[in-house]
Structures are given as structure tokens and as C-alpha cells.
Image: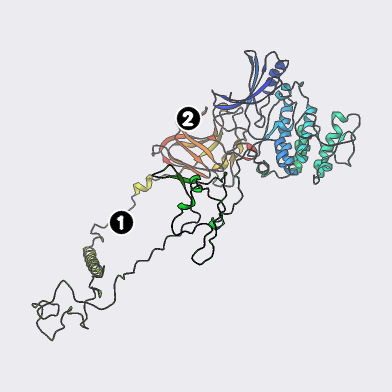
Amino acid sequence: MIDLLSESGGGRFWRAHDAVLERFVALHVIDADDPRAPGLVEAARTSAAVVDPRILRVLDAAEEDDRCFVVNEWGTGTSLDILVTHAGPLGPRRAAWLVADVADAIAGAHAVGVTHGRLNPENVLIDRYGSVRLIGMCVDAALHGLPPGDVQGDLEDLGGLLYCALTGVWPGPSGSIVPAAPRENGAFLSPRQVRAGVPKPLDLVWREFECTGEHHHGHGRRMFGVEHPDVSSARGIADELLAFVGDPTGMPESLAQAIPPVNELRPVWLPSVEDPLPHDSSRDDIPVVRPAQERDEPEGDEPEGEPAAGQADAGGEPAREPASPPDVTDLPTEAGMPVFGEDDDEVQWLRTRSTPPPPPPPFEDPPERPLFADGVRRPRPDLGPGPAGNGWPASVTDDPASPTGYWPWEEDGSPSSDFEATGEIVPGRSWLRLALGVAVALLLLVGIAVAFNLGRGRTVLGGDPDEEPTSSPSASASQASVLRDVTATDFDPLGTDGEENPGSVPDVLDGRVSTTWRTSTYKDQLGPPPGLKTGVGILLDLGEPRQVSEVDVRLLGATTVELHAYDEPPTQAPTGRPLARAEGADQLTLTPTDGTSAPARYLVLWLTSLPEVDGGDFRAEIAEVVVRGERA
């Protein structure tokens, strides 16, 4: 047991964990000697006869260790009472759809002779997908000490649910924490009188409840023209409300959007606060308290150069006597750091700066040095002056008529451009020339090598040219082709009648995607117990033994498909390792896991997981099947 959710009337309601099946369950516990114990166990047994995914099942009921307990499925969602009290009444179509779904589930229970007994807003849950879940079937009435319910009580509660969903108040006979509906002259007001905008057809449904309810027997049926909705059974109520809803497409999603975020974590937005202004030291009015010995010092100990109190200064004006600051005993709290003197025990406080420090001086941008400077050229310093004083060695030239002191290719006789006026080498000039020369040489070598290889009839890199591929007859014959003369039949060995829509099975081999074969519609997903059965499928007869290479299946919706191969027609559900397995929507390709073709006469497409359709049901749909292979 994990959480104690409620405790009242000698009973306890727990959220518990089933350690065997690894799931959460709801647990009701009362004392074995409680007068409600026999009725509680009997109610649990009665509710077990109803099998509907919208009604939370009773899993166990027994009396042990002086305790009587009932174990139910655990349901998650928002109850109708929380929905209408937090988000307000529902819209007309949402309310009609909700109560129609509840009425349809109750109609199934009435068909097997079971009534709910206490169908109030607290026992109607809406999960996050918009699906309805009913709790407390028979058990809730027994826990409240009520006798077993009857069909008329459930019908009146259905009318109360419609009233509550439309108006947000509760008129039903069963107790509820939702505020009671208003009355006038001993009768409840109609929904249109409580809330404006309620459609007339829904208002007429409630008025019909008022006419046929037990608390109005003897008053007779009130006539409202010729419109008399059928509220004599839960099935009739569901049909009337569904006729008002019309096209139900998107109604579960619309109902899910009406659920308020009751338990969601919401971000908290704090109000914006303006930045505080910088402190102005000129407005400081906090006096400073001097030590006692400084206030008691004699006047003769004043420092030189300072006029005494009451004396005149050099200008002849009497000196102004400084006003002593008042003694302050309570100072405001201010952050600081104590500073202890070296020679005495006095403590001074290093306070924070009254004004912010000045910003640091800006960084000066470094002077730009161009990569290739233009300016006066200078002779190369590494050559040094020659005998002629022209910067060249005497062995280079002695002709005075030739340009002196500079490179021979400088036409204007100016110094080399590799140096600035300061005599420093310009960075990058010689490396750029070297890199350019190396690149040109590499391109030249590559061009020569490519031309040489092409001239010899080889590839660009010097390899032998590939021969043109030729198709051999043997290779063409070995390719898998589409197998003809394949027949298909439905395969449902786990069903009660052994059939699964056999009339439309040939449509999967007609070559048209518009014609499909559908499985039956299931309330639960396929799988091992407690599932209804492990799978359903199609049996393909290849006519004779063939080598199967692959099977292409075109599906509508996400489905899990297994491929099993047989030499004789199978009669039992497939077991063991499948020949291939795939999962997905649209088109699936089933290929043997070992990569080679497999011999077989019969193939079974075994569906182990079905896609979910509207209303929480499950159904698969196959549009086309193509088998590829060759003769064995």
C-alpha cells in the first residue's frame, strides 16, 4: 500500500501496488464485522459480470484477517465534479458526448442485469485523451451503506450528469459534493433556466426525465408538442444524445482540451524591480561617533596651525567654532570590515565606497602594420656596402654606369620593396613568393602526370579502366519475381467462430490499394493474457512449394506483423521464431532474417499488435500483399 487517499465511516481507501503484475490498484478496506461487509463482497461479485474498458473492473474481493477488502483497477483522470467546479460547465456538444458515452457503458451493464447504484459526478473520470472511465460500479453504493441500485435510479443519475455538465450544479438523486441545482415550487429549474445558451433538444431531454422520474409519479407526463425524447433506457438516452452531437469526429480530443491543468506546475512571474540608483555621498546624514578620549582632550593639545575655538584667523574674522556631532547610539546596519590598529586596541571600520569607482581607462588600439608596405625602398642590409659604396660587393659589378646599390630588375634604381623605410623586413613577402612558386610547380607536375596516364589508355590516377558490366542470363534468372496464383483466406484459430471478415480477404491480392481487408474491432490490444488473444492474420497459399524472398505488405496504421512459413496448412496459432518480423505503418517489407530465400507452400501474416482507432478501440487494415520469390 502506497498512499492512504481517504478515511471515513470506518473504511479506508488506498492507492496500492500489485507486486505480481507490476501495476497500481485501488484498495477499499473495512472491518469484517462491519454491517456493510457482506453487501460489499456481493457487490464486487456482481460488478465482475460487466466487461467494458470504460468501466474499471473489480480485480479481487475477500475477507482475511478480520478485514474485508475490494481491489479495483486504478484509473487516472479528472472527475466531472472537479471539471465543472474548476473550469465551469461544458459546451453543449461536449456535454452530450460525455453523457452519451457514459450511457452507452451503462446500457451494456443493464443488458447483463447490473446497475451502478450511485452514478454521481465523482464517479465519472475523463482521462487526458478524452476517454471516459466509470468507477465504483456497484461497490460505491455498498460502501455508502445503500441497497443495490435499480435501472430507474441509474437513468435519473444519467439525467443528472447531463444537467451537471451543462450547468455546473447537481440535481440527481445520488449524493454529490457539487452544489445542488436551484428549485422553484419544489421542482428543479430546467437547464435553459439556469444557464443561457443551452440548446432546446438537450433541455427537452432533461424535461423528459422530470416527467418520468419517480419523484414525479402521479403528475403524469407533461406534453411538449410532439417532441418526446426516448429516456426509458440507457441505450435510448445514448442514441438521443449522439443524434444531437452528429459527426463525432474529434470529440474525444475536444473533451480532453476542456480538462483544466489542476495539478500542473505553472511558472511564477515576479514583478519587475527597477535597478537601484547609485549612492550619492553628498546626501549622507549619518553622524560619526568619536571615541570618548578624543572628546575629552584639552584644548591645548590641538595641532599647530589650527586656530583655537573663538580666536580670529589671519583675516581678522573670528574662527567659526565647529559643531560637534551629536552622540548617536543606534546606527543603521552597514556592511564593513574591521581594521585593528598596531599600537592600541582601537577598532576602525573600513566601509564601502560611497561612490562607484571610476571606470578603467580605455585600451589604446595598437598601431596598424600593413602586410605590404608602400614607401621608400632601402638597400638590403645583409649585403653590406661594397668597395664602390653602392651596397653591392665588388665581385658583382664594378661598372659605374650600371645601377648601383639595388637589385638589377629595379628599373627606377629605387631600393628593394622588401624593406620599409626603417630597414625592417616586411613580413610575408618572401613566404608568399615561395608558396606561389611551389603551387605552380605542383600544378604543372599533376598536369603532366594526368596527360601521361590518359595517353597510355589508363585512368586519371593510372589504374586499369573498369570493364563495362554485362548482364548474364543466369543472374537475371536468379532475381526474385512476383509470384502469381496466390490465394488468401482469413486465419483466426483463436477466435470463437474461426472467421475474421472472410468476405474481403481476396481484396489484398487484387492490385488495388482502394480495396482493403479489416480485422474485427477489439476493445483491448492483442497480446498475452489478460489480452483476448495473441494475434490474428491471413493465410497465403502459394499453390506449390516456392522459394520466398520477401513479402511486401501495405497497411493503414501502425501494426506489428510476423511472417511464418509452413509446408502444410496450419490449424493452430503460430508459435516459435517467425521467418521475419516488422513493425510500422504504410508499407512493410518482410525478408527472411538470414538474408536468403526460404522454401514454403503456405505463409501466415500474423498480426500481433493493432493500431488504435477512434473511441479507444483497436483494428488493423491491410490494403495489398505482394509475395516475391521463385520456384523451388
Q: Residue furthest left?
A: 395
The secondary element bearing badge 2 is classed as loop
438 vs 236: above or below: below
Numbered badge on residue 568: 2
Quadrant where the C terminus lies? top left
| Residue at (58% x, 43% y) in the render | 516
Colouring convention used in this rendered image of the protein = rainbow
560 vs 494: above or below: below
Give the side of residue 119 with respect to residue 382, left or right. right
Q: Do the numbered discs 1 and 2 sit on residues whose CB atoms are within 8 Å?
A: no
| Residue at (35% x, 66% y) in the render | 366
In space, the residues marked 1 and 2 are separated at their CA atoms by: 47 Å
Numbered badge on residue 397: none
Q: Position of residue 213 (x, y in %)?
A: 84, 31
Give the side of residue 323 with respect to residue 112, left or right. left
Q: Position of residue 277 (x, y in %)?
A: 56, 56
The answer to which of marks 1 and 2 sits earlier in the sequence is 1
Quadrant where the N terminus lies? top right
The foreground one among 251 and 386 is 386
Q: Position of residue 278 (x, y in %)?
A: 54, 56
Kind of residue at badge 2: Glu
Quarter of the view holding residue 522: top right
